[in-house]
Image (cartoon, rainbow, N blue to C red):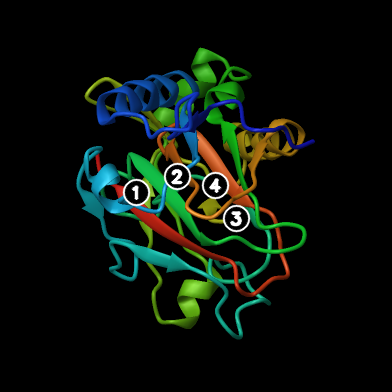
Amino acid sequence: MAKSPDSVLSCLDMNGEPLTDGVLWYAFRQLLGNNGYVHLTGVPESFDHVAFLKELGEFQPTSTGTLVGDVKPERGMDDVNHGQNRGALTPHTEGYEFQGLPPRYLALWCVTPPSGQGGETTLFDGDRILADFTEDERRHLRDTVYRWGSTEGLARHGVTPTAEHPVLEEHKGEPILRFSTNYLTVPEGDETARRLIDRGNVLFAEQHIAVRYQARDMVVWNNWRMLHSRNAFEDPSRHLKRVLIAA
C-alpha cells in the first residue's frame, strides 16, 4: 500500500516567504541523508532547478546522451517497458546498464502535472531489503558479477547498453545497491539474487511512498540506496524534467 512522503521540504517558511539558500540547503541535505530522498514543495516560479541541482555534483548523461531530459509520453511506446510512455514502471535503481558507477542522485521536477489518477513517482529504501539478508548472502551479492541489460523502449531506438557489475559494492566507503526487476540476468541456481528481486518487489509493493506532483515540485533521491518506479497514468500532458548526478 502506498504511503504519503515523509521527507518533505517546503521552499517557503511559516510566513509564506522563500527560505534563504543557507536554510534551504541545510534542511535539504539533512533530509536527504536521513531518509534517502527529499520531496521539495512550495517551489516559487523563480526557482532555478538546474542551478540548485548542480550544487550536488556534475550532471551525468543518460543512455541517449541527454543531461537535462524530458520525461513525457512518446507515441508508439505504450506496449513496452519504457520511461517515455504512460505505463507503470517496475522497481529499479538507475544506471545499472552503465559501465562505470551509477548516478549518485536522480532528480525529477514537474513541468505539467497529470490530471486524473496515477503518474506518481514511487520510492522505497533499499536498506530495508538488505536487512533481510545475512552477511554471507550480502557477500555473495558483492562477489558475484552479473550481467545487466536495458529496456525494450531504448532498444527500439537502437540503444542497447549492457554492463557487468555486482549487485552490491562500495565507493569511497559509500554502499551502492543495484536493482532491476527485469534486466538483471540471474544465473541458474543463484537463489540469493532471485530472492533479492522477489523480496524487493514484495516490500516495494507493500511499503513504497508515492509522490503526487504539483507544478514545479521536485523529488531528489540517493540512487545508490533508493529504488524507484512510477504508477501508470492516462493524461498525455504529464511532463517532468530529469537529471542524473554523478558521484
How far, Cα to Cα, is label 3 from label 4?
Answer: 9 Å
How far, Cα to Cα, is label 3 from label 1?
Answer: 37 Å
Judge by depth and name the residue closer to the eye, 234 or 10. Answer: 10
Residue 75 image point, x, y percent: 58, 84
Q: Is residue 107 above or below residue 82?
A: above
Quadrant including the N terminus: top right
The numbered mark at residue 92 is 4
First in sequence: mark 3 vs mark 1: 1
Locate residue 13 relative to residue 60 in the image: left or right.
right
Residue in the picture at 63% in, 19% down: 132
Q: Do residues under tags 2 and 1 come within 8 Å of each other at their CB atoms?
A: yes
* Residue 167 lies in quadrant: top left
Q: Give the residue type at disc 2.
A: Val
Q: Do residues under tags 3 and 4 come within 8 Å of each other at their CB atoms?
A: yes
Foreground label between 1 and 4? 1
First in sequence: mark 1 vs mark 4: 1
Residue in the picture at 39% in, 21% down: 33
**Which secondary structure, mark 2?**
loop
Q: Which residue is mark 3?
A: 182
Residue 84 image point, x, y percent: 54, 70
Q: Which residue is mark 2?
A: 43
Judge by depth and name the residue closer to the eye, 39 or 149. Answer: 39
Q: Give the residue type at disc 4.
A: His
Foreground label between 4 and 2? 2
**Which secondary structure, mark 3?**
loop
Label 1 Cα neighbours within 10 Å, binned few <14 / some 14-19 / many ≥20: few
Label 2 Cα neighbours within 10 Å, binned few <14 / some 14-19 / many ≥20: some
* Residue 11 lies in quadrant: top left
Q: Give the residue type at disc 3.
A: Asn
